[in-house]
């Protein structure tokens, strides 16, 4: 497995960002590009679906799709946790819409 050096954020679920929680890490490229728990390198990979649906510009809905899609795939024991995370982001999005 080849390695790639990236910045990882402890707060924003591993996405590279500029907040103060970012740390440097050496990770396997497979962990970054097309991880199996996000659909692998298929037309149905979460990021590709979200881009096609225009959800890549909405962090809340992107995370809803991401957590639902990976529920139980990364670790079977974390399926409920992934679905609760999806519900959290959906509730946040709904609260935003209700303020409008």
Image (spheres, helix red, strand yellow):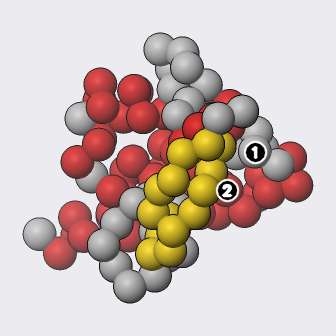
Residue 36, by quadrant, is top right
With 76 as the anchor, is 1 left or right in this view? left
The residue carrying mark 1 is 74
Residue 59, by quadrant, is bottom left
Crowd rating for badge 1 (residues with CA inside 10 Å; few <14, some 14–19, many 20+): some
Residue at the location (51% across, 26% down)? Answer: 45
Above or below for 100 versus 4: below
Task: Give the secondary structure at mark 1.
Answer: loop
Q: Calculate the distance from the C-alpha at mark 2 to the C-alpha at mark 1.
A: 10 Å
Q: What is the quadrant of the N terminus in the image? A: top right
Which label was assigned to residue 82? Answer: 2
Nearest the camera: 83 or 13?
13
Residue at the location (61% across, 25% down)? Answer: 40
Which label was assigned to residue 25? Answer: none
Total residue callouts: 2
Q: Are marks 2 and 1 in contact (CB under 8 Å)?
A: yes
Above or below for 71 versus 51: below
Above or below for 92 versus 31: below
């Amino acid at each position: 497995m080849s390695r790639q050096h990236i910045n990882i954020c402890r707060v924003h679920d591993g996405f590279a960002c500029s907040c103060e929680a970012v740390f440097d890490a050496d990770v396997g490229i497979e962990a970054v590009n097309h991880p199996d728990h996000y659909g692998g390198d298929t037309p149905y990979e979460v990021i590709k679906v979200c881009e096609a649906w225009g959800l890549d510009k909405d962090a809340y809905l992107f995370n809803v799709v991401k957590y639902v899609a990976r529920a139980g795939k990364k670790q079977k024991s974390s399926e409920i946790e992934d679905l609760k995370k999806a519900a959290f982001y959906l509730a946040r999005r709904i609260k935003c819409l209700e303020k409008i």
